[in-house]
Image (cartoon, grey):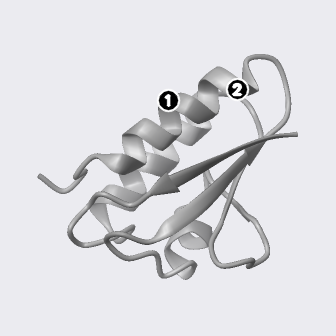
Amino acid sequence: MAERTAIIGSAVGLHARPAAVFTQAAEATELLVRISKDGSVPQDASSILGVMTLGAKFGDTVILHADGPDAERVLDELAELLARDLDA
């Protein structure tokens, strides 16, 4: 299983629009991508409800997990996405 650490770059955290942008990108990968914060149970990264329940705020660190072909590349891209301000 591949893992990546990402820091939330959106000023509002992973709430509403940033969460929607991220979950759509995770779903488009066609891999099972999971996201966790502070040792929480990993949530399905394509589920907006799951992502929002993490309560990830600006500057928080999250861990992305995935298995499958190109998992390393996919997680790199998703980590870069999370580092941007997705609400701008």
CA distance for labels 2 and 1: 9 Å
Give, as a three-letter code, the residue at label 2. Answer: Glu
Q: Between residues 18 and 38, which one lies in front from this camera angle? A: 38
Left or right, residue 70 beside residue 67: left
Mark 1 is surrounded, within 10 Å at the Cα level, by few (under 14), some (14 to 19) or many (20 or more) other residues, namely few
Q: Residue at x 51, y 66 (%)?
A: 61
Mark 1 secondary-structure assignment? helix
Q: Position of residue 35 (x, y in %)?
A: 66, 59
Q: Which residue, as the protein is rendered here, is positioned at the far left?
A: 88
- Of mark 2 and mark 1, the one earlier in the sequence is 2
Q: Is residue 8 left or right of residue 51?
A: left
Q: Which residue is mark 2?
A: 72
Q: Quadrant of the N terminus?
A: top right
Which quadrant would residue 59 be assigned to in this image? bottom left
Q: Is residue 53 above or below residue 59?
A: below
Residue 77: mark in rendering? 1
Front one among 78 and 51: 78
Q: Are marks 2 and 1 in contact (CB under 8 Å)?
A: no
Q: Residue 19's image quarter? A: bottom left
Tell me which residue sits at (48%, 82%) in the image. Answer: 55
**Residue 78 rendering spot, x and y as whole percentages:** 51, 38
Residue visible at 37% across and 76% down in the picture: 57
Mark number displayed over residue 68? none
